[in-house]
Amino acid sequence: MAIEEVESLRETADNGYWYADQDATRRGVTVLNALRRYRSAEAAMRRRTRSSMGMGETDLLAVRFLLDAKRRGEQVSPKDLTSYLGISSASTTILIDRLVKSGHVERQPHPTDRRGLIIVPTSHTDEEVRNTLGKMHSGMISVAEDLDPAEVAAIVGFLDRVCEVIDDVESDESRTR
């Protein structure tokens, strides 16, 4: 292998991926590295949000799930939360107790099942999330609004295809277990 080829492969490896030196592959690596930088920035933002709100990762996921359900007009039972988070019912009870104690959620009677409960985020939680993430979301929307329709189609198409690849890999792994 020529020294130039080794240097090219080393440069590609330094960028986070190890592939043959081809123009299409370089473009692909460039895009995947940008996606990796985005994911790192998003992970850092989630850490800051958790720290700001005094929550763990599962707590924040639960709150986001509850806020999304509330916006859709859906009710969430503890069983729904257990299923979404993939944790045990005992862990869900502890999680809900913790979120009730911190003032982020409330237990309310189920409107049609007198023995059941629903879990509802408090208005304080919605405000806190908006205050914590509002500036970032506004900036992201602004960037997205600057895209022309062809750019939107390309980005959405790319991300949808990447999601399909990831889902296929997860499906393959679950079939081999």
Image: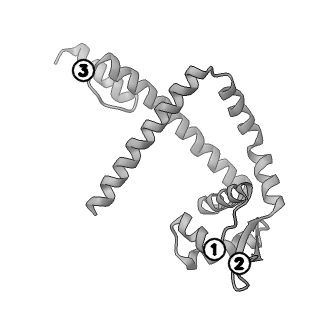
The numbered disc on residue 133 is none
Mark 3 or mark 2, whichever is nearer to me: 2
Q: Are marks 1 and 2 in contact (CB under 8 Å)?
A: yes
Q: Which amino acid type corresponds to the residue marked 1 in the rendered image? A: Pro
Q: Which amino acid type corresponds to the residue marked 3 in the rendered image? A: Val
Circle 2 residues within 10 Å: few <14, some 14–19, many ≥20: some
The numbered disc on residue 6 is 3
Instruction: Specify whether 137 is left or right of 161.
Output: right
Q: Secondary structure at mark 3?
A: helix
The earlier-in-sequence mark between 3 and 2 is 3
The earlier-in-sequence mark between 3 and 1 is 3
Distance of label 3 from label 1 (alpha carbons) = 56 Å
Residue 144 percent coordinates (x, y) = 65, 28
Q: Residue furthest front?
A: 112
Q: Are marks 3 and 1 in contact (CB under 8 Å)?
A: no
Q: Secondary structure at mark 1?
A: helix
Distance of label 1 from label 2 (alpha carbons) = 7 Å
The numbered disc on residue 117 is 2
Residue 100 percent coordinates (x, y) = 75, 72
- Taking the spot 63% from the left edge, 76% from the top edge, the residue there is 94
Q: Are marks 3 and 2 in contact (CB under 8 Å)?
A: no
Distance of label 3 from label 2 (alpha carbons) = 62 Å
Q: Secondary structure at mark 2?
A: strand
Residue 52 percent coordinates (x, y) = 73, 53
- Taking the spot 67% from the left edge, 48% from the top edge, the residue there is 48
- Taking the spot 55% from the left edge, 35% from the top edge, the residue there is 38
Instruction: Specify whether 6 is left or right of 141.
Output: left
The earlier-in-sequence mark between 1 and 2 is 1
The C terminus: image quadrant: bottom left
